[in-house]
Image (spheres, helix red, strand yellow):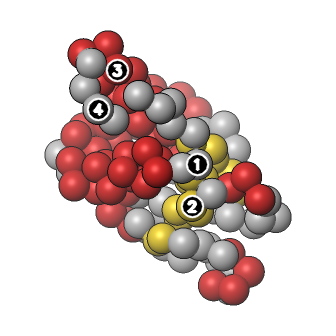
Amino acid sequence: MRAMKIRIKRVYDPVEDGDGTRILVDRIWPRGMTREKAQVDLWLKEAAPSTALRKWFAHDPSKWDEFKARYSSELDADPETVGKILDLASEGPITLLFSSRDTRLNQAVALKEFLDNLSEKKRIRGEKT
């Protein structure tokens, strides 16, 4: 079983050779960013937190742990979207792109943690990721 390589970065950062498949995980297209400049391979809006959750969180650090828990519940309820990301990650490196200025507390960080935890659980159970 091959380990998945999942990176995260701001969509505004330069494209790099090691990015692999570039997946935008924002519900809204990044402000001021053209499709050509973003070089997004897949815009997976379904992987973004719901609008209600995103507005509730409002990048408030005191809500981070609760945000991750609620977002994980949303992801658990959408196995098709999660499976799409895992399938791409099993084929080669992927980069989860986000537009937030906050590089530590955003949905891409939470999504990567969710995927890493899910992959680890499957590895322990001997399942294919």
The answer to whether the residue labelled 3 contacts the one labelled 2, judged by CB atoms less than 8 Å apart, is: no
Identify residue type, mark 4.
Lys
Residue that mark 3 sits on:
123
Mark positioned earlier in the residue sequence (3 or 4):
3
Which corner quadrant of the image does residue 54 belong to?
A: bottom left
Quadrant housing the C terminus: top left
Count neighbours of disc 1 (C-alpha within 10 A) and say few if under 14, some if 14 to 19, many if 20 or more.
Answer: some
The answer to whether the residue labelled 3 contacts the one labelled 4, judged by CB atoms less than 8 Å apart, is: no
Which corner quadrant of the image does residue 121 belong to?
A: top left
Judge whether 109 appears above or below 16 on screen.
above
Residue that mark 4 sits on:
128
Dot in front, 2 or 4:
4
CA gap between label 3 and label 4 equals: 7 Å
Q: Which x, y percent locates residue 74?
A: 25, 45
Mark positioned earlier in the residue sequence (2 or 4):
2
Identify residue type, mark 2.
Thr
Foreground of the two, 43 or 103: 43
Identify residue type, mark 3.
Arg
